[in-house]
């Protein structure tokens, strides 16, 4: 009997271990595959030319694989998205957790989270047929498919992440802290601004980083609304010009390249850069979260 | 009974027919009580008797609870704090509060103290520094923390945190300080320090303290009020309440027969 029970326990333990190991192994293999195929490019192409090259002309003769226009395209669109979504997201989170009647908050939060479930192609479609023409008319541009359109769409898509995680962070601040501030004659706004927000800063920063991660990795929507011109965006007029992001480049070109060609490996190299960037952003978000949790609890 | 207890000129807070409901629960019933100036008044009674609810009426902290409805008068210096034109911010500046669990803000010790003066408009750095030193000294904490004012307040021990919260309240220069079971989360030594502090503070402040510790009420307070099920059963001189209670229920409670 005893032997049998121990046996069962051990079986359960090893099953769980194997299942969770598989996840890690898959992740590891994807990385390996991605970096291996990316590195093959540098047998024929120099790393410096790739990173600092200003032209992405994979079909010209000789082909040019310069990352810069794509990298800057991604950064411009993402930066714009963050500028729009952070103020909106944090104020919404403050409203939901601190100001709204609990009944309204209970109604609002699920709605915000549903926004995250809308497929990105739907956002892209909306951006293409509604927002792009509007931007074109509003700013009197030759085309509405510009970085700004992409930024606005990405901002909307990053909002659920930013609102939801910031709201969790703000709600997790114990109410005793708010009471302490109010009892000293602080107004509700002073309490939010000087006590609650600083205390929730870690969670809010993590929310912003994760929203940024979402924006930089988004493919379908930006491909549909940013025009996909692989040119280095000018500053500051690049925001109302067509740009092409790293994600859109991979999605657009991968179907047309012969497997194993130089172009094919160049796309993998772009993918690696994207992977490293999102990995770093998530890592930073995690570090901030842990660091401030420590600070809140004292050392 | 209470009219005779405290002379009109010595009344700091006068409560007339206070009733409070949480939704449909009648939590405080017809409370009338006079709180004397520069004395310690303790509120005792078993859990759920309404003593904490009552003390939170005195600086309108119950405003934060949506289902809460209040009738009756609370006069602080003759002015009803539930009048429509009362500025709650100004009221809470005059009537400070220390809570059950120490709740320092997640900032430095010095910033915790200067928070109050700052939000009330004090900008001068020198003034803020002297207010900080004064408040920490009054709360008997200055000697322990003077060399680490810029360190996080969350690194202090529980008892130190509670004294920090008292100092923080003092920095706003209130007239009345409400203590809602300030020692219930503390060890006996920290409790003794806080009690000593409260007795010192009564020279300058009117103090109302909720406690579930009857010895504490007997040790530190001048007047004691006994609450049961939302009603004020008995109120009087602490000595009289503990040695010669008029009501059977008070006697049962203080002799430990229930509660």
Image: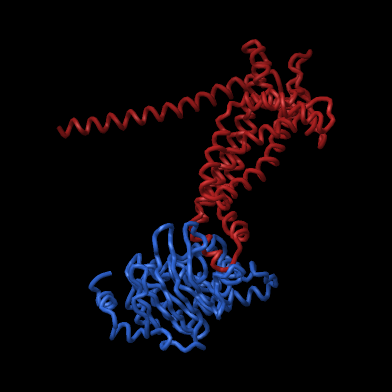
Chain colours: A red, B blue
Q: Is any part of residue B19 visible from this angle?
A: yes
Q: Is any part of residue B143 visible from this angle?
A: no
Q: Is A219 or B81 nearer to us in this picture?
A: B81
Residue depicted at x 25% and y 76%: B252
Q: Is residue A8 above or below residue B237?
A: above
Residue B54's quadrant in the figure?
Answer: bottom left
The location of residue A60, given as percent across then percent down, is 78, 14
Q: Is residue A33 above or below residue A12?
A: above
The location of residue B10, given as percent across then percent down, is 50, 87
Q: Is residue A101 above or below residue B18?
A: above
Residue depicted at x 57% and y 56%: A196
Q: Is A58 or B195 nearer to us in this picture?
A: B195
Assign the N terminus of chain A to one quadrant of the image. top left
Q: Is B120 or B125 nearer to us in this picture?
A: B120
Count of numbered tags: 0
Q: Is residue B54 rendered to the left or right of residue B86? A: left
Residue at the left extreme of this rendering: A1
Residue depicted at x 69% and y 23%: A224
The location of residue A173, given as percent across then percent down, is 51, 54
The location of residue A197, given as percent across then percent down, is 59, 54
Q: Is A214 or B258 nearer to us in this picture?
A: B258
Residue at the top extreme of this rendering: A258
Residue depicted at x 51% and y 56%: A296
Residue A263's quadrant in the figure?
Answer: top right
């Amino acid at each position: 009997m005893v032997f049998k029970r121990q046996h069962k326990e051990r079986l359960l333990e090893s099953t769980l271990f194997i299942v969770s190991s598989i996840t890690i192994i898959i992740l590891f293999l994807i990385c390996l595959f991605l970096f291996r195929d990316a590195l093959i490019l540098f047998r024929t192409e120099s790393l410096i030319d790739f990173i600092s090259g200003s032209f992405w002309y994979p079909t010209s003769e000789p082909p040019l694989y310069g990352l810069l226009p794509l990298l800057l395209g991604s950064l411009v669109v993402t930066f714009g998205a963050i500028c729009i979504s952070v103020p909106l997201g944090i104020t919404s989170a403050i409203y939901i957790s601190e100001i709204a009647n609990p009944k309204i908050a209970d109604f609002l939060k699920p709605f915000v989270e549903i926004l995250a479930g809308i497929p990105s192609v739907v956002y892209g479609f909306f951006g293409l047929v509604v927002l792009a023409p509007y931007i074109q008319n509003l700013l009197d541009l030759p085309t509405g498919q510009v970085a700004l359109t992409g930024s606005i769409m990405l901002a909307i898509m990053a909002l659920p992440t930013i609102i939801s995680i910031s709201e969790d962070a703000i709600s997790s601040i114990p109410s005793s802290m708010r009471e302490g501030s109010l009892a000293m004659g602080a107004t509700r706004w002073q309490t939010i601004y000087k006590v609650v927000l600083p205390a929730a800063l870690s969670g809010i920063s993590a929310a912003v980083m994760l929203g940024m991660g979402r924006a930089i990795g988004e493919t379908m929507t930006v491909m549909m609304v940013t025009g996909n011109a692989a040119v280095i965006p000018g500053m500051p007029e690049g925001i109302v010009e067509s740009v092409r992001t790293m994600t859109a480049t991979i999605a657009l070109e991968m179907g047309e390249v012969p497997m194993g060609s130089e172009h094919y490996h160049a796309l993998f190299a772009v993918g690696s850069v994207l992977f490293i960037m999102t990995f770093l952003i998530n890592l930073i978000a995690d570090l901030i979260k842990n660091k401030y949790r420590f600070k809140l609890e004292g050392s | 009974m209470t009219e005779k207890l405290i002379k009109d000129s010595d009344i700091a807070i006068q409560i007339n027919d206070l009733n409070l409901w949480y939704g449909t629960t009648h939590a405080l019933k017809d409370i009338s009580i006079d709180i004397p100036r520069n004395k310690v008044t303790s509120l005792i009674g078993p859990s759920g008797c309404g003593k904490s609810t009552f003390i939170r009426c005195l600086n309108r902290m119950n405003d934060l609870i949506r289902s809460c409805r209040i009738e009756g008068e609370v006069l602080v210096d003759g002015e009803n704090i539930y009048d429509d034109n009362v500025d709650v911010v100004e009221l809470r500046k005059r009537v400070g509060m220390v809570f059950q669990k120490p709740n320092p803000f997640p900032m430095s010790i010095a910033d915790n103290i200067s928070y109050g003066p700052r939000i009330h408009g004090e900008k001068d750095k020198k003034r803020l520094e002297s207010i900080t030193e004064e408040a920490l000294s009054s709360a008997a904490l200055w000697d322990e923390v003077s060399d680490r004012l810029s360190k996080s307040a969350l690194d202090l021990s529980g008892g130190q945190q509670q004294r920090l919260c008292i100092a923080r309240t003092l920095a706003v220069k209130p007239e009345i300080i409400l203590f809602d079971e300030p020692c219930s989360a503390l060890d006996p030594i920290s409790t003794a320090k806080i009690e000593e502090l409260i007795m010192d503070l009564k020279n300058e402040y009117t103090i109302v303290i909720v406690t579930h510790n009857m010895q504490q009420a007997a040790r530190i307070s001048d007047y004691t009020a006994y609450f049961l099920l939302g009603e004020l059963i008995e109120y009087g001189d602490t000595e009289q309440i503990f040695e010669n209670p008029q009501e059977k229920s008070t006697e049962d409670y203080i002799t430990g027969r229930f509660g």
